[in-house]
Amino acid sequence: MGEAKKDNARPRRKLGRGLSDVSHVFLSGAEPRGSKPEPPEDADPFDETPPEPRLWLPDATYISITSGEGVRGKTTLSANLAFSLRSRGYRVTLVNADSDQPDVLALTGCSGEGGPDGPPAADEAFGRLPVATVFDGGRSPGVSGPDVTESLAAAGRESRFVICDTSPLADTSYGVWRVADLVIVLTEPCVESMRSSYVVVKRLHAAVPGTRVGVVVNLAAGHAEGEQCFRKISAVSRDFLKINLRNYGIIMRDQAAVEAGERKVPLLGAFPGSKASECVESITRLVLMDETAIARRRTEVRPEECALRRGA
């Protein structure tokens, strides 16, 4: 009786890999693994035209620096952070991605015109730092436009760090945020600035969920005021957006930063012992310490190949 039931029973099929193949097809709409699509009937069997290449960003750490509307110091932080990393021997490219106020060109003394030897570069005071622009003629491309990605890929081919000065409102910023490993939002210790910076964090989280977001408090009277400002904006983001912001430090109010901006020289070079310079150095150290977490892609750098390094 048992043997008859065994003979009449339908053979059982093993699912295993087959189940994963079926789920792969129905959930993603892709072809089953291991299968090849049939060529069209009129296809030339001798056609050796290579397929269209896909765009891959180079191995670099992409950092976007933005701010709330009306918050000051975004371009200054971008230029000085790039100069600080460059002075440590890293290959750095500074990207002008703010189509609303492209102040990075004026601050670094870059003419915006490249030569046969390479991309445009900053003035001698900034160590001839490469400066790239990712928008054309002041008009930002669409959010999904390929121009931003192409320009960022070109900037990252010869760089370890790509520092992008981005506007909080321009469409170009969304294209930069999509590939950024870290977005630093600049704020100030006042209600209006914290509110506008929180709007940027909310907009960023809605556009690119999961992006690593850090906060830098600018123009703080002291460490206590800077920490209090960060705790407020961090608590609101955690309660309403369910995200955790990273504290990347503060920049204390210092007249040396104003004078360096007026003279169009790097703060670290003109006033190395000032309070603002020490704050920028602290932010640089935090970025380097946290690089293993913020970088999805990276490349090895040999300091002897860099134009600027300590002791050179």
Image (cartoon, grey):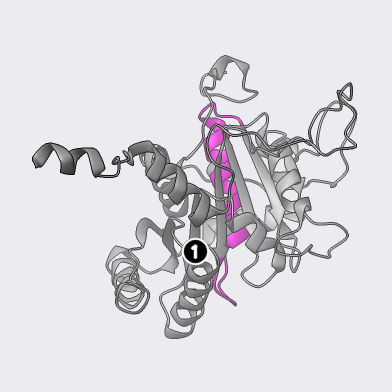
**Magenta stretch contains residue 85:** yes
Q: How far across and down, in percent of the image, does residue 55 sit?
A: 70, 39
Q: Is residue 267 left or right of residue 138?
A: left
Query: Helix, strand or loop at disc 1?
Result: strand
For the N terminus, which image quadrant? top left
Looking at the image, residue 274 sits to the left or right of residue 228; the answer is right
Q: Within the image, what quadrant is residue 251 found in?
A: bottom left
Return the residue nearer the eye: 239 or 114.
239
Q: Is residue 267 visible?
A: no
Q: Is residue 3 visible?
A: yes
Q: Position of residue 131 (x, y in %)?
A: 73, 43
Question: Within the magenta stretch, is there residue 233?
Answer: no
Image-based side of 79 in relation to 26, left or right: right
Q: Residue at x 65, y 34 (%)?
A: 36
Residue tagged 1: 185
Residue 5 position (above or below residue 148): above
Q: Which residues are magenta?
A: 67-91
Q: Nearer the viewer, residue 18 or 279?
A: 18
Of residues 292 and 82, which is closer to you in this image?
292
Q: Position of residue 220 (x, y in %)?
A: 40, 68
- The residue shown at (42%, 81%) is 190
Residue at the extreme left = 1
